[in-house]
Image: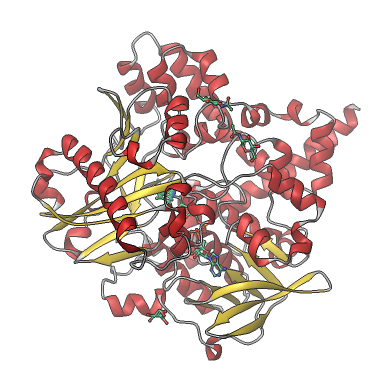
Amino acid sequence: MMILLILLLLCLSIASLYYYLWFHLGWGSLFSEESIQPPRPLVTDKRTRDKVLKQGFSQDKIPANLDALIIGSGVGGLSAAVALAKAGKKVLVLEQHDQAGGSCHTFQEHGYEFDVGLHYVGQMHEGGMFRVIMDQLTDGQLQWNRLGDQYDSVIIGHKVYKVYAGKHEFPDALKKQFPGEEEAIDKFVSLMKKVARHVPLLAALKIIPQFIALFILKTGLLHRLSPVFHLTESRHQDVVEKLTSNKDLQTVFSYLFYGVPPNDSSFMINALLLHHYKRGAWYPRGGSSEIAFHMIPVVERAGGAVLVNASVTRILLNKGRATGVAVQRKDKEICIYAPVVISDAGIFNTYGQLLPPEVRIKPEVESLLSNLQYGMGCFLVFVGIRGTSDELGLQSTNLWIYSESDLNSMMEKCKSMEWEEICQELPLMFITFPSAKDPTYSQRHPGHSCMTLLTMAPYDWFQQWSGQKPRHRGDEYQRMKMKLAEHMVERAIKEFPQLQNKIDYMEAATPVSNEHYLRAPKGSMYGAEQNCSRYQCEIVSKMRSQTVVPGLYLTGQDVFSSGVAGAVHGGLLCASASPYISSYYYI
Ligand SMILES: Cc1cc2nc3c(=O)[nH]c(=O)nc-3n(C[C@H](O)[C@H](O)[C@H](O)COP(=O)(O)OP(=O)(O)OC[C@H]3O[C@@H](n4cnc5c(N)ncnc54)[C@H](O)[C@@H]3O)c2cc1C
Ligand SMILES: *[C@@H]1O[C@H](CO)[C@@H](O)[C@H](O)[C@H]1NC(C)=O
Ligand SMILES: *[C@@H]1O[C@H](CO)[C@@H](O)[C@H](O)[C@H]1NC(C)=O
Ligand SMILES: *[C@@H]1O[C@H](CO)[C@@H](O)[C@H](O)[C@H]1NC(C)=O
């Protein structure tokens, strides 16, 4: 028994060491110091950018002798593409939208530029592991601006709590704001560290053969190896209730909200999120489209391409093996073949839309999917403001506004509300000023600044317009969304009265917009719901890059976790699961 335990520990440690070296130290011949070039000047010319981000699909642009096909150009698809390109592989990335980047694309309207789904990213300090990875994936071209130390404010009712970055500043600032809670804060920080240190072991569950992972889990050995497995399966609420009875502090421990209330979220994910920003929060210099803009050339250099307006309708199978994909063109399909197919379209689209029903009804697929559900949708308001961020005194701090400290009942309310009610009583809202996070914004868009507002929104509020084209959804849709948008802007002006009469442009996006532009199933914001069910160790191990279809791999936010960092790790896990890199590495 003892020998078995030691052997298993060894096996997990090797897998996690492998993961650690690979991902965190940029070790090995794929990633090298030499590939990092000094950053070239920011490219602002739209035509030059479009040449990279908007390469339209046509048959003559398909490279010959492809090594891999990737469905979707989100950061999950592109990071897998870059890793394979660095191993010398020729990869074709196919994107259904008219530009690359997925949730990290941006759009321009009336002289303003707006981000779709990147507000801030952590662990970008020099030498930090995620920084090393991003530098490697973009050849050192992507630069990051650090937000101010006080990167977030959490507003609960009328009370304001300030969250500071910094190893010591984070707990110290909380202790000042929650006197008497010093012990709870220290304990939380120590659990947070434990989770962050041991999380590679969790990733190892996705790397080692699944039968071994399930065996150590079923025999109860897993939980003896590290506390991270238990903290992953534990509900956030149950862990923090043991630390403190202060409701506001409990809320601050889980304020980075992704739609799952504390009584159904994994403690590990919430702790990891706070840890993610512990050293600071960063924003890409030049806006979030810079990520794709600097990843695509690496793919192209290896002979690959990233083509847009290329909607994949199905994954082609031959004797049960993935052999290629079909792309929809007006009235015909174009079939493209490659020995490896990778999907960044998310687990629901991949099994539900892209594969034939006989795959979906396989018992192992049905059982995995039954443990997952569609994530919550969001409602976004994009606001263009006259005046620069400096002139208006806008800061890089983000605001999280909650009407109450009980996030469980808040979320319950949000789910069951009729949409009219939310226009009277907004349960939660997030406010951010992308223009204040990026000094180049005022160079790129002189005299302008912008604000993004976000709240959670159930899909069924707007479901009746699903499948209809943007700007063709009729007056009722427009009226509904602008009513909520105006209500949210009014609420934001209460926090920032200087914006009164400065608002120049307003647009709103619903879960149906997300469904259209990102193919997000049911408009979900972060892929498959990250509730406790997804983070049971058995599901963690089964949600891996390999699929039941030989030759088909998953990448992106459904592999490990959501967020830019989550999707990039998904991409690297995917690349290392593919035949190209693991063989390369295990030698
Ligand atoms: C409003 C919002 C705010 C966010 N804020 C942050 C933040 O502050 N920090 C952070 O770290 N993360 C944030 N995120 C999350 C982060 O952006 C995502 O988790 C991450 O970018 C997901 O990357 P992905 O590659 O997995 O998926 P996606 O970016 O969704 O990419 C999937 C791509 O696949 C394409 N596709 C799908 N089906 C097909 C098909 N059949 N054929 C061709 N192409 C297809 C889609 O068009 C899309 O481009 C935010 C997300 C949202 C929505
Ligand atoms: C993509 O398709 C849209 C709509 O058909 C078209 O307007 C756009 O020019 C296309 N983009 C590219 C790069 O081909
Ligand atoms: C979490 O997701 C699973 C899978 O769909 C579901 O069975 C479970 O009820 C969810 N939890 C809650 C509280 O919704
Ligand atoms: C979480 O709390 C809400 C509100 O109290 C409740 O309705 C819901 O059922 C709870 N969910 C779980 C998984 O306990």
- The answer to whether residue 330 is above or below residue 296 is below
Residue 413, given in percent of the width and then of the height, sits at: 43, 30
Ligand 4 position by quadrant: top right
Q: Quadrant of residue 238?
A: top right
Quadrant of the drawing holding the C terminus: bottom right
- Tell whether 159 sits left or right of 509: left
- Figure check: 110 above or below 366: below
In front: 343, or 170? 343
Work out whether residue 562 can be spotted.
yes
Q: Position of residue 102 (x, y in %)?
A: 46, 62
Q: What is the x, y in percent for residue 501? A: 8, 48
Residue in the picture at 64% in, 55% down: 573
User: Would you say residue 285 is visible in this rendering?
Assistant: no
Q: Residue at x 26, y 76 (%)?
A: 45
Q: Residue at x 53, y 49 (%)?
A: 566
Outermost residue, bottom direction?
A: 60
**What is the tally of numbered marks visible in this picture?**
0
Q: Where residue 346 sits: x, y (%)? A: 59, 57
Q: Nearer the viewer, residue 420 or 388?
A: 420
| Residue 343 picture quarter | bottom right
